Image: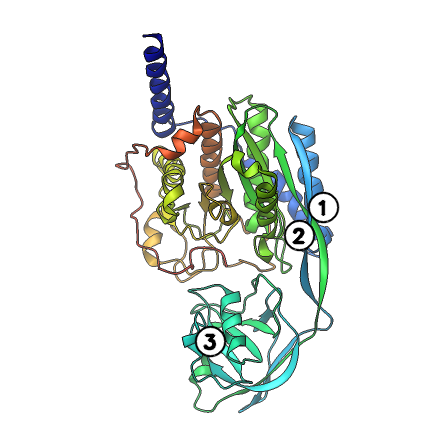
Amino acid sequence: RSLVGLCYFAFLLLCCVSVHSMNTKPLSAVSIEGIMAHLDAFQAIANANGGNRAAQNPGYNASVDYVVSVLEAKTNYTVTVQPFNFEITEENATPKFSQISPSPVDYARYLEFNTLSYTGSGDFQASATDGGDGCSASSFVGFPSGNIAIVARGDCDFSTKTDNAVAAGAMGVLIYNYEGQGAFSGTLGSTKSVPVFGISYDLGRSFIDTTETPVLSMFCDMSVVTVYTSNVIADTTIGNDGSVIVVGSHLDSVPEGPGINDNGSGSATNLELATELYRNNATVLNKVRFAWWGAEELGLLGSSYYVAQAIESGEINNIAMNLNFDMLASPNYFRGVYDGEGAAAGIRTGCVNIENLLTTFFDFDNKPWNLTEFTGRSDYGPFIENNIPAGGLFTGAEVIKPDNFRADYGGMANTAFDPCYHAHCDDIYNIDQEVLISNAKAAYYAVTTTSATPLLDRWLTTAQQSPKDRVRAPHHALPTSNVFTKQ
């Protein structure tokens, strides 16, 4: 009888936790003042270090030092700086891009073209040929070897496009942006053998749609160098070591700017979550591991290294779930929650439960939200690839805001969610504080709820009841591409 009673009590406790998780409006300790103070610090670091906080540059190391100093001053967490290294290509000379014929034109870097990280070297003139979306070998049927491939952005990653073009004999690759958008940068994820530039939609289409095949010149002189960098890891000193919640955000920017929205907003929020969890003496039954990842902008390198080390040591078996916060304050935002239904079958229930935890907070806070694609293109990727359920928040990057999102979020149509994505203007003025504090409160709710949940592994594998009658935002079907995720 006592065993039956104990089991019944445990069942009631689990149910109460579930009800609390989904049906109460929490009081959040996080403040916009605290988050903005961290963002001001990141901006000052960028200002003092060449205008950026990229993983390969001194501004990143200064950002690491700042995060560590705050954690050591305001918490009793076990703080670890986890070193790792990677190879990247660096410029030996300024890249150049021009049209030779039918009319000579020299294109301006940053304004009309940009290099992608890991671009290869080359110095040549060649005819330009349309390579479609570049996502499969069929895009290059009949492609003349020795030409420059022009491919559209979207539907697959930049590396896949480049590899397919090179396999078809391309000497260089031009990737043109989405309609209405200008030159851009991004990461190829690994070193390439040919120059790869990001150009505007209009310029790319002009090369394709002309009646006379253009001859273009590409010049890029690169060297491969080894970069030594690090992640920052901070563990609560209490909580079950066998049930760890990893709360992550990437700390690096792109070289083009200070990265205050991408991803100072996520990193500053994560720092506020960490310090407030400690300051408020929150219940921590499951260990919380706060993480600031390095080199996300170069291909999720920091989080991938962490997960690889966890697999090697066996620590992966102790990780219950991952929360990821990347770009939480886009100025022309939508309130995006990762769509857990997009996860693999083995972790789908856990991912959906995390999704529902976040959306329920927004429902009770009377805030509209939309699901956003869950394709592994931020630092949760290495976790879901290794069967760790994950979830998180995102407010949009370079994609044009659809008209039907304005009814719920306001803002400007025909403008990117973040017009300063991966640009020099992603600074302290590129932050929407209203959506930032809304997301921070939802994140705090998710952290405090899951850290206080007994039998977290059972919660992650048991479908939860979640009322949706208060959802204000219509759930517009998102495009079947990666345009609502980072690339």
The quadrant holding residue 346 is top left
**In this view of the protein, which residue sits in the foreground, 487 or 188?**
188
Q: Secondary structure at mark 2?
A: loop
**In this view of the protein, which residue sits in the foreground, 233 or 402?**
233
Q: Assign the N terminus to one quadrant of the image.
A: top left
Q: Where in the figure is residue 165, as x and y percent of width and height?
A: 51, 75
Alpha carbon separation for disc pair 3 and 2: 30 Å
Q: Which residue is mark 1?
A: 62
Alpha carbon separation for disc pair 1 and 2: 8 Å
Q: Secondary structure at mark 1?
A: helix
**In this view of the protein, which residue sits in the foreground, 470 or 345?**
345
Q: Amino acid at mark 1?
A: Ala
Q: Which residue is mark 2?
A: 53
Q: Where in the figure is residue 435, as x and y percent of width and height?
A: 46, 43
Q: Amino acid at mark 2?
A: Arg
Q: Which residue is mark 3?
A: 202
Q: Secondary structure at mark 3?
A: helix
Alpha carbon separation for disc pair 1 and 3: 39 Å
Q: Where in the figure is residue 386, as x and y percent of width and height?
A: 49, 45
- Earlier-in-chain disc, 3 versus 2: 2
Q: Where in the figure is residue 264, as x and y percent of width and height?
A: 58, 46
List the single residue furthest toward the left. 469
Rendered residue at 34%/56% (across/down): 478
Q: Are marks 1 and 2 in contact (CB under 8 Å)?
A: yes
Rendered residue at 40%/58% (across/down): 401
Question: Seen in the image, is 477 located left or right of residue 123?
Answer: left
Of badges 3 and 2, nearer the viewer stands 2
**In this view of the protein, which residue sits in the foreground, 433 or 456?**
456
Q: Are marks 1 and 3 in contact (CB under 8 Å)?
A: no
- Earlier-in-chain disc, 1 versus 2: 2
Please give the count of numbered marks on the rendered protein. 3
